[in-house]
Image: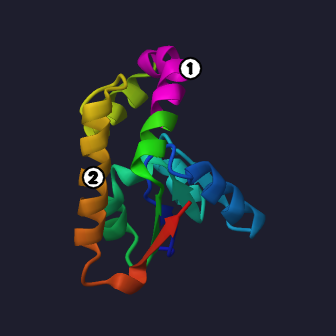
């Protein structure tokens, strides 16, 4: 299988900017791919759908590179709250996003406490998973 680049940061952590930068460098990138064919077609994939499956993607695409986008948690929470306020209805109409958000955050709607815990849990999981492979993970603080 082809080596890939996976942006494993949660939504609102700079995944759109990462996708744009990769595309500008000529790396075809799927932002929030909603099916596996999008991952296979592109060299890179980013956002929550990738974050939720990073361990599986590592097994399927060995020797790939992973980028964890991070930002100040309080600013991330503010951004999520605003984004969910604006997009919540659309999110709730999508079974894919409802399931994804429940898997990652413990809720399909914004809940500051659950999202705060999910942010820490996700970062801990990524850091722990790559602890013996530091060259496979780039942490990008946006």
For the N terminus, the image quarter is bottom left
In the figure, 39 relative to 133: above or below? above
In the picture, measured across the screen, residue 9 lies left or right of residue 15, that is: left
Residue wearing tag 1: 86
Outermost front residue: 74
Determine the residue positioned at 24% across, 61% down. Answer: 125
Q: Does the magenta stretch include residue 108?
A: no
Residue wearing tag 2: 120
Q: Where residue 134 sits in the image (x, y, percent)?
A: 35, 83
The reply to whether residue 102 is in sight is: no
In the picture, measured across the screen, residue 9 lies left or right of residue 29, that is: left
> Closer to the camera, 30 or 79?
79
In the figure, 116 relative to 43: above or below? above
Going from N to C along the chain, the mark reached first, 1 or 2, is 1
Q: What span is in magenta?
A: 80-93
By secondary structure, the bulk of the magenta-drawn segment is best described as helix
| Marks 1 and 2 close (CB-CB < 8 Å) | no
């Amino acid at each position: 299988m082809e080596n890939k680049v996976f942006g494993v940061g949660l939504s609102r952590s700079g995944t759109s900017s990462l996708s744009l930068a990769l595309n500008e460098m000529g790396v075809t990138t799927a932002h929030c791919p909603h099916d596996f064919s999008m991952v296979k077609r592109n060299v890179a994939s980013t956002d929550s759908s990738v974050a939720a499956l990073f361990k599986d993607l590592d097994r399927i695409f060995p020797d790939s590179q992973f980028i964890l986008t991070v930002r100040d948690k309080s600013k991330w929470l503010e951004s999520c709250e605003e984004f969910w306020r604006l997009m919540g209805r659309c999110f709730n109409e999508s079974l894919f996003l409802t399931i994804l958000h429940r898997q990652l955050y413990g809720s399909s709607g914004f809940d500051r406490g659950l999202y705060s815990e999910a942010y820490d849990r996700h970062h801990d999981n990524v850091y722990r998973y790559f602890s013996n492979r530091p060259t496979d993970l780039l942490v990008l603080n946006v």
